[in-house]
Amino acid sequence: HVQLVESGGESVQVGGSLTLSCAISGDTGSSLCMGWFRQAPGKEREGVAATYLRSGSTYYDDSVTGRFTISQDNAKNTIYLQMNSLKPEDTAMYYCAATNYAGRLSRFEAQIYNYWGQGTQVTVS
């Protein structure tokens, strides 16, 4: 059982920066993969970034490559999403997710994640 709590979402100006946090608690198991997803009104949920806690490997959706950075602080059991050069299209509810999935599906597929946070709203205008 894993519990995730996101924080840091707020309103920010176009071109600004913002950092989201996801606190992880409970039994994480082995080879845990953490993902950041977002969903805007009228749009499907989409994967933004993902990282493996053990290896630190990172992956990004093309829409955020070069602007967003996913990182982890193992001591604090927390992952972060540093967002720079924010655009209006980045406006969405951002969710933190966790999975021990070891199959061949993309880590940006929401269906492979079995733990989700409550979400934190990011508004860029």
Image (cartoon, helix red, strand yellow):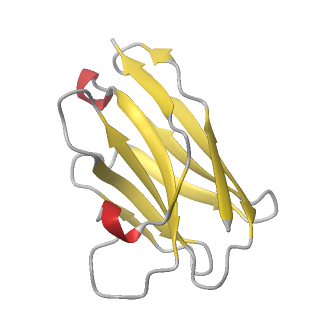
Instruction: Classify residue 54 by image quadrant.
Output: bottom right
Seen at 50% across and 57% down, the residue is 97
Going by the picture, which residue comes out furthest to the left?
A: 42
Q: Residue furthest right?
A: 75
Say if 100 sits above or below 78 in the image.
below
Residue at 61%, 73% (x, y): give it.
53
State how many labels appear.
0
Is residue 108 at least partly visible in the picture? no
Residue 124 makes an appearance in the image: yes
**Residue 105 rendering spot, x and y as whole percentages:** 27, 79
Q: Is residue 17 left or right of residue 61?
A: right
- Residue at coordinates 41% horizontally, 45% vertically from top-left? 68
Q: Is residue 36 above or below residue 98?
A: above
The picture quadrant where one finds residue 76 is bottom right
Q: Quadrant of the N terminus?
A: bottom right
Q: Is 18 placed left or right of 103 in the picture?
A: right
Residue 118 lies, in percent from the top left, at: 55, 40
Task: Point out the image quarter for the C terminus.
Answer: top left
Q: Position of residue 7 (x, y in %)?
A: 62, 34
Q: Nearer the viewer, residue 90 or 101?
A: 101
Instruction: Identify the residue at image location x=52%, y=79%.
Output: 100
Give the vertical position of 39 relative to 96 (above or below).
Answer: above
* Residue 73 to residue 85: above or below: below
